Amino acid sequence: MAGQTDPHISLFSPQEVEFMAEDELVEIVPNMNMEQLNFISGDFGRFIPQIPTKVPLWLAVALKRRGKCSFRPPGWMSVDNLTQILEAERESQSTFQALPFSYVEIARLLFDHAHDDIPDKYMVRSLVEDIRDVRLHKLETNLGSFQGTSAVKISNVSAMEVNIVRPFVRRALEAFYKHDKPEADVDRDTRSSRQQREANNEPRRPLRQR
Amino acid sequence: MASNSEVGGSSADYETMMSTSDVELLKRAWRNEKAAPEILQYEGALVERAKEQIELVEETIEDYVENGKDPLVVSLYQMDLDRTQFLLRSYLRVRLLKIEKFMFHNLKSEEAERRLSEQERVFATKCADDLAKHFEETVLLKLPQNYQSVLKQSAISEVDDMVPQPHLETFVVCRSNNFVSLNLYEEGESPETVEMERGDLYFIRYKIVKGAIESGQIDLI
């Protein structure tokens, strides 16, 4: 089981992260008639030709592979939107742009199975890859600026990115915490006589890591 | 076929609860269990409902195949069934792994024991007994008198220091479902709080969010 015994590998395998992303709803346009599907995970359908409908990603990919539907790419995947996001990512060193939590997985699955449904697919693909690179690079550089703290806020980081950095950040934060804490214990006993240095030795305020 | 979870909580939460399917609940339980360092409360009712639904769908699929229903539809139902089964099985497997890892601790600590299901408790006791017996026969009985305990390093140890404990100080990634304000440190130390808006992601010490996870306010990612 990934990550349970070996702290060096990620908690969830990439396939499991993709599994979790596959429940996201996407819009498809079926080209056939099919009745409503009463799954354990929900009710989907009816499927009528040319009427768009929302289904989970796994179902959409299955239908697409059998040639039963075509995809409507999600709104955030347009060239304009992605270019804007890429610019914003490059500008800011510490904040991440708002992207769907599973954008990596959704983009990957669409490129693999439904590339003919995406307008300007090569442009879109290269934009998504650039965005991924910039964000990962940002994550790596920001990791170097952690301080000892108990809570770090990471806004707008996506599922795959979290999974990649998780093992390292976990151990780094644990080491920080371990080294900060005994000093706090010692400090409690001698607090009255060491007013001056108290501020430095206590665990620092949690940084707003963006 | 998506049955609903139990009613509870404020009216805003009521809406979310009534529309959360069992599969989503199971997914959440699976994710939390995987990410948490210690074993969490067994979701007995959820597992039972999931098992019933799985059995129902299995029967339905058999009927469909016999009646010559559109094979596409059958294969789609089968896929959905496979996904749900995977969630259920992985959930149970993760729990078993944790039980095995912290075998003696789970039986010693009352809090942990309450979180196991009936069958898990039986499994854990039998496993612990077998392991203890194995250790005794192969090694411990051959050691000098004071060192023969499975739980303690020697007779002069005050606590059971041979028992590995779950590492509660580890950091986890979590996302909050509501606005929640948590005390960062233990009682008596400087009371700093961290406030989480709905949908924020945090790297945080597990101990801090433990209570909030149990009450459903925070999810582990």
Image: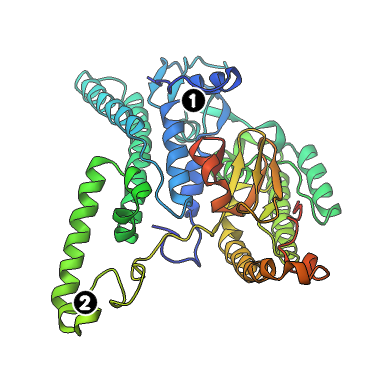
Vertical comparison of B70 with B108: above or below? above
Number of numbered markers: 2
> How many angstroms separate mark 1 from mark 2 (CA)?
52 Å
Report which residue position mark 1 lands on.
B20
Report which residue position mark 2 lands on.
B148
The numbered dot on residue A36 is: none
Task: Indicate left or right for B185 with A46 as reference.
Answer: right
Q: In the current view of this chain or complex, which residue is farthest to the right?
A: A91
Instruction: Identify the amino acid type marked 1.
Output: Thr
Of label 1 and label 2, which has the lower sequence position? 1
Mark 2 neighbour density, 10 Å: few (under 14) some (14–19) many (20 or more): some
Question: Could you tell me residue A91's position as x and y percent?
Answer: 86, 53
Instruction: Identify the amino acid type marked 2.
Output: Gln
Q: In the current view of this chain or complex, which residue is farthest to the left?
A: B137
Corner quadrant of residue B100: bottom left
Task: Indicate left or right for A190 with B16 as reference.
Answer: right
Local SS, label 2: loop
